[in-house]
Image: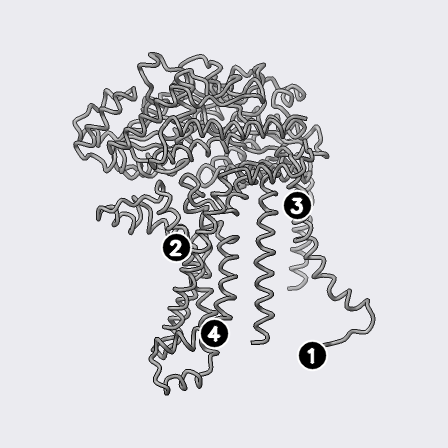
Amino acid sequence: MQRRSFMAGAAALGLAAPASLRAQARTEIQFWHAMPGVLGEVVAEQVRRFNASQPAVTVVPSFKGGYTDTMTGAIAAWRAGNAPHIVQVFEVGTATMMAAGPAIRPVHELLGENGVALDPKRYLAGVRGYYSDTKGRLISMPFNSSSAIMFLNLDAFAKAGLSTTDLPRTWAQLRQASEKLKAAGATPVPMTTSWPTWVMFEQMAAMHDVPFATLANGFEGLGTELRLTGPLFVKQVEYLLAAQKDGLFRYGGRDNAADGLFVAGEAAISFMSSSLRSRLEKEAKFKWAAVPLPYHDDLTKSPKNGVIGGASLWTLTARNRTPAEYKAVAAYFQFISEAEQDLWWHKSTGYVPITLAGYEKARAEGYYAQNPGADAAIIQLSRAEPTPNSMGFRLGGMVEIRNIIQEELEKALQGQQGATQALESANRRGNVVLRNFEKANKA
Amino acid sequence: MERKTVFEGKLLPCLLVAPQLLVTILFFFWPAGQAVWFAFLRQDAFGIRTSFVGLENFQDLFADPLYLETLRNTLVFAAGVSLIALTVALLLAVMADRQIRGAGLYRILLVWPYAIAPAVAAVLWIFLFHPQIGLLGRALNEAGLPFDYKLNGTQAMLVVILAAAWKQVSYNFIFFLAGLQSIPKSVLEAAAIDGARPAYRFWTVTFPLLSPTTFFLLVVNLVYAFFETFGVIDALTKGGPARATETLIYRAYIDGRVNLDLGMSSAQSVVLMLVVILLTAVQFRFIERRVHY
């Protein structure tokens, strides 16, 4: 008995030795991500596919909590000298990461050094612009991108006698639809919104080709200043305040706190991330439509592209990092940029495809004909050539600025201040954040 | 009076306290010292560019009207939490102290909430108070009372105070119950024989005899409200709406971890450290006095 277990142990050791040797021959890459639940499983599956596709690299994915936790965790790890090779950082952290010179390895450098040729043009314009420098070179790797779009409860529309095919496209049309929805009592409240800052300020500025901040929304330098007191933003906030006053709009909280209102059928109109599609397919007990965000037709007849949300992958440096490790990271980036992989990612997550080829493939196989509205975000992102106002945002302390805008908007919705005053306060406080960031990041 | 063990020489006693000292230095003094040092620096998130700015962080902090508002919020919050947690716990302890069937079961049930993680507790409160999905929130709105803690600052403050106080009631309850049980029965009987009615007996005999416990708990509750309610606030309101429920500790977290402004966050930690030192000093003075009780 004893001898048998000893033999078994020896056999196990004998087997284990070559296995660990094999593992050593593969370069191990740490990948920290912020994708919970089902999305996390898709990331793990993507990594498995990559690991199985080649003999040299093993990517090890680890879930590190929400976007904020993942980013601060990676920064702390870098300061301690053992950063992960790849970290997923949300789009509003882009300026902070870009300012971190020696801590990051820009994607165009990484690919160039390792002889991987990836033309930036292969990525969707709206995606590429957000993560490129002013020379159009990619700094981080596009990964999960979404956009904010409008979701409509078609059952409620039918109940209010509204058309379910000719859907509202402008804010004025939405106002009329809301009034009818209210009169018919189709849902407890006609309209709400998720991501108040992203939808009502960032997306609206891009679509109407209006600056959110100077110096091309910060792309051209740290000296950028907010432009939140402009007429578009006043109009937008006043629109919301008037709608709230007339019982047409209800504030559902910060970030994505209002998602549930639409999903539960409490609100008939909402503006949410396009990645909410999969949740609606599972949970919504009504017919719904996903269409591009509305615009003000007295300000523009042809809205520009919207901006993305989501996150990108950053390559971090470390003292003892070898060229082989960087090469392995480049190989992974190359893999996820393949049209085939991108298509799979797009369909399994509900995020937009990051490459044009992935999008074309999905269209060719009739994916959007079977899933109407699944391309609303893509249409919105690529319907115009990005202008300096619609490329994206490169503002230091963007998380803080978003929260400041939300706070001042909340104060206005509480009735403590008017639209102009809210925007002036947000502008002033946001500029303090920008100046502090500028001071901290100037050598 | 006190029993003292005297060690020979210096080596052994030093060796015996060394592990404790090491832990304290490594996990308390070092990070605290670092926070103090960071409070005088300005640096980017990665710590690549660092410059010494003297007292600038503190100047910015106290020149910020929002920080003073946060201070006011914290005082309202701490006072509310302590008041509710203490009175409810005292009431429950007095009730559970009587001769009732199944007293043990009541006591266990009352201590239970203390074992629940703050974030879980907050989720339970969301199920109660959420204006659309919460039991109570829905009922209030249907009864024609507009209730929306996501937009109404006063209501939000009320909700976080209730949630935070509820967690602390159990802790206070244990101490009050122990305090009540250590009051000599003879004193109460003497008062009863003199004709004092129960309520009168409580206010003139029981309550004064409980005062050391009450005072100790007051300090503990204030410390709790100041420093340990992060989870409840983060899960329920995230400091909103419009900063109505932002406390000092929550602001330090937001500035440091979310906004990545370590200098500002450290300056706030130093301010908080001074508050802890003050509260601890008060508590120690009190405990010293209790020895003579």
| Residue farthest along the right direction in this orientation | B9
Q: Amino acid at mark 1?
A: Arg
Q: Amino acid at mark 3?
A: Val
Give the mark nearer the N terminus: 2 vs 3.
Answer: 3
Question: What residue did someone put label 3 on?
Answer: B36
Q: Quadrant of the N terminus of chain A?
A: bottom right
At a point 58% along the width and 55% down the height, the residue shown is B276
Res. A364 image quadrant:
top left
Closer-to-camera residue (B67/A218): B67
Q: Is residue B46 above or below residue A361?
A: below
* Image spot of residue A163 (x, y percent): 20, 23
- Asked if labels 3 and 4 share a chain, the reply is yes
Question: SS of the residue at dot 3?
Answer: helix
Question: SS of the residue at dot 1?
Answer: loop
Question: SS of the residue at dot 4?
Answer: helix
Question: What residue did someone put label 1 on?
Answer: B3
Q: Is residue A227 visible?
A: yes
At a point 41% along the width and 23% down the height, the residue shown is A203
- Asked if labels 1 and 3 share a chain, the reply is yes
- Asked if labels 1 and 2 share a chain, the reply is yes
